Amino acid sequence: MKITLNFDITPAEMRKLVGLPDVEAFQQQLMDDIRTRMTAGVEGYDPMKLFQPYMAGTMASWDMFQKMLTAGFSAGSSERSSDSTNGKAGT
């Protein structure tokens, strides 16, 4: 038996349903503050510094992912080479 339910619900109603806070006012205030600083040309304001914390975390994640893949490939190739030296066929 297969049952399908369709709900016509807005994102705001869904947030309330699962208990997530409404952060729209906070996001709007943050964007207004950033916009004000950008248009005013605040001394020392650098747009790249705004995104730097996000980029550092992203680049570190990619580096860790790359190391994980390299370690996995290295382990796989060393297992195959040890099987071939022992006279076993790869499975």
Image (tube, rainbow, N blue to C red):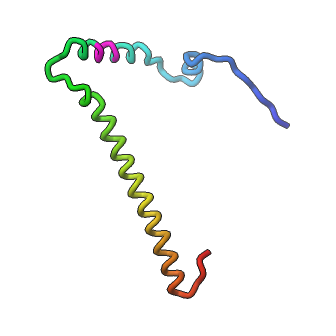
Q: Main secondary structure of the magenta part?
A: helix
On the rendered structure, is 57 left or right of 37? right
On the rendered structure, is 76 left or right of 46? right
The residue shown at (41%, 13%) is 25
Image: magenta residue range? 31-35
Which part of the image, by quadrant, shows the N terminus? top right
Horizontal and vertical percent position of residue 40: 21, 12
The residue shown at (34%, 16%) is 31
Horizontal and vertical percent position of residue 9: 64, 17
Q: Quadrant of residue 28?
A: top left
Q: Quadrant of residue 6?
A: top right
Horizontal and vertical percent position of residue 54: 33, 35
The residue shown at (54%, 23%) is 19
On the rendered structure, is 36 left or right of 29? left
Tell which of 27 and 74 is nearer to you: 74
Horizontal and vertical percent position of residue 46: 21, 26
On the rendered structure, is 89 left or right of 52? right
The reply to whether the magenta stretch includes residue 13 is no
Which part of the image, by quadrant, shows the C terminus? bottom right
The residue shown at (19%, 15%) is 41
